[in-house]
Image: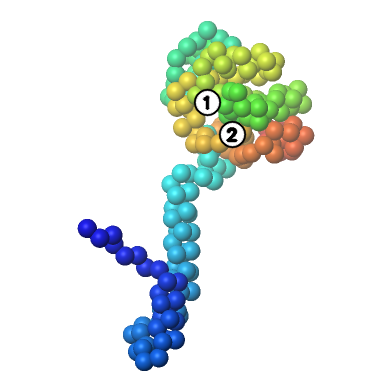
Amino acid sequence: MTEPRRLDPDRAARAAAERAARPGTPPPAIDTRRYQRMIGLFGLALVIVISVSFLTSRGVGTAGIPAGRPMPYFAAPLATSNLTGDANLHPPCTPARHDPRALNVCLMLGRGPLVLAFFVTGSGTCERQVDALQALVPRFPGVQFAAVAVRASRASAAAAVRAHRWSLPVAYDPDGAVGQLYGVEVCPIVELARRGGTVQRRLIGGHWTDSRVLAGPVATLARTAR
């Protein structure tokens, strides 16, 4: 079985030139040289289309909850508690039914604006995002701060809390359900939500791991609580 032939514009052009140089050789029915640029542009366009399709299907650029959208509710066990298990994606929104060993976003958003970070344990850049939140806690008493360790065990999340001496509530998301709910595909990522749960702004990338830079968006969020 012979191998199928492939279109090679450069090879066809060379062959055409060689035939034209030989006396008595009739010209080819089609001069492929004028189609080379068209074929090249078509190939480039095809690569671009495939790349855009791939990136879109992977959700690149859409991580997190965009501004203006409601923040999904969840309750996840705190790393410093003895509560174990996966997060509850339909948590009770009344204090009477709340387990204090869990981070309950619904209750937090009922009290005021919230700055919520998602991170991966063992990632220096992502953990510095939580450091930045921790540094801003005393500066913005009207704002609540919290973090979630995505796909982390209680042991690894608790170890990070101890190592960094975080006092803000840190929950862990062992099966990644909360991370999936929020579309967490990268870290560091921070969601800033107004009281009631509407996302005001979504921050992605290491630029926001500097507390001095992060202070600007948090100050803007704090003004919504007045």
* Residue 25 horizontal/vertical position (percent): 36, 88
- Depth order, front residue of 127/76: 127
Discs 2, 1 touching: Cβ within 8 Å: yes
Q: Amino acid at mark 1?
A: Val
Outermost residue, left direction? 1
Q: Which residue position is annotated with label 1?
A: 150
Q: How is the image coloured?
A: rainbow
Outermost residue, front direction? 23
Task: Say left or right for 23 vs 173.
Answer: left
Image quarter where the C terminus lies is top right
Q: Amino acid at mark 2?
A: Cys
Residue name at image x 61 percent, y 14 percent: 159
- Depth order, front residue of 44/150: 44
Residue name at image x 48 percent, y 69 percent: 41
* Residue 154 horizontal/vertical position (percent): 53, 14
Q: Residues within 10 Å of mark 1 (few under 14, many from 20)?
A: many
